[in-house]
Image (spheres, rainbow, N blue to C red):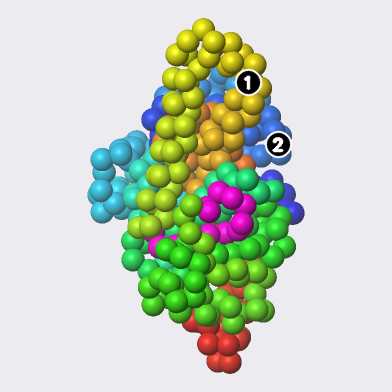
Amino acid sequence: MGAAPRIAIDAMGGDSGPAVMVEGAALALARNPALCFRLFGDESAIRPEVARHAGLAAAAEIAHAPETISGEDKPSQAIRRARTTSMGLAIAAVKSGEAQAAVSAGNTGALMAMSKLALRTMPGIDRPALAAMLPSLGDNDLVLLDLGANTECDTRNLVQFAVMGAAYARAAMGIDAPRVRLLNIGTEEMKGTDELKDAAAQLRAADYLRMNFDGFIEADRLGRGEADVIVTDGFTGNIALKTIEGTARFVADLLRRAFTSSLRSKAGFLISKPAMHLLRVHLDPNNHNGAVFLGLNGIIVKSHGGATAQGVDNAIGVAERLVSHDLSRRIAEDLDNIRAHAPTAGVAA
């Protein structure tokens, strides 16, 4: 591990703006006093928030940005305003080396478009992918990608996503050889599209990579702890993610309704309160906040727009770990390995 990184923060992104983003930075600083930040946005709005948190001013530099990217801005509009917006300037800080990673809770499409244009994709990567860690019943969280950056993917993209996802799992969770599986409509080898079947064949042949490829997995097994990394195209991945989030909210609302339906059920709630607390903690998206654009020449972390300060702290923690464990180098080494074996192993290079 290297020294604690400098994190660029788009302080104007997210539903609550500077208040939550700055408080998240303060929580991160309390967790790791070696961190330092560059906060981009309206200085008159950011400075009072910084002043609320003892010690943060010494670790946080404020860089004024006159404009903000809204949730309604199209990526093409955002790109034209990259040099004047808090999001664009945070990304530029990563490109210039002023910061080792950037965190934003703003418009996902704009963040992806500006990040890709400014940082470019790594050699050997055709398209960046959006990856996030989700809760599971296993010993560790689950890495799922792509979550919407690429609605259509070919074999080459899926293989590259598997390489990047495995490197992410090694860096973020310390798993030496992550179990990687492809999301499919069945586990049999003949099931699925030609792209899925070809990607599976190539990954099975790539036994020189630091991963254990375990074939296909169906959507109803996503959270069962049977894989560390699950790979799919962005269209399917985004639907899977939204279904998981919606189901979690449905279960929570159903339990809340059940426990308030009668005096007996209220008494039952008091008895089961510790278990309910564990369930709430496990399903709270703030505890797993921080999706990453993998495959770029720089670390960009996307926070939920509605994240709490704790959620922002977790997103900063993701950025911190990926920089400290040198994720970009790990991905580059695996891509070099693929290119070295491509003529004999048949893996897309």
| Residue at x 30%, y 48% (from the top left corner) | 78
Placement of 307 over or under 188, stated as above or below: above
Residue at figure coordinates x 36%, y 61% from the top left: 150
- On the question of residue 305 being in view, the answer is yes
How packed is label 1: few (under 14 Cα within 10 Å), some, or many (20 or more)? few
- Magenta stretch: give its range: 221-234
Tag 2 residue: 32
Amino acid, disc 2: Asn
Residue located 63% across and 39% down the image: 36
Pinpoint residue 71: horizontal percent, then vertical percent. Answer: 30, 39
Residue at the spot of label 1: 272
Q: Main secondary structure of the magenta part?
A: loop
The quarter of the image holding the N terminus is bottom right
- Taking the image as shown, residue 202 lies to the left or right of residue 242, namely right
> Is residue 294 inside the magenta stretch?
no
Q: Give the residue furthest to the right.
A: 1
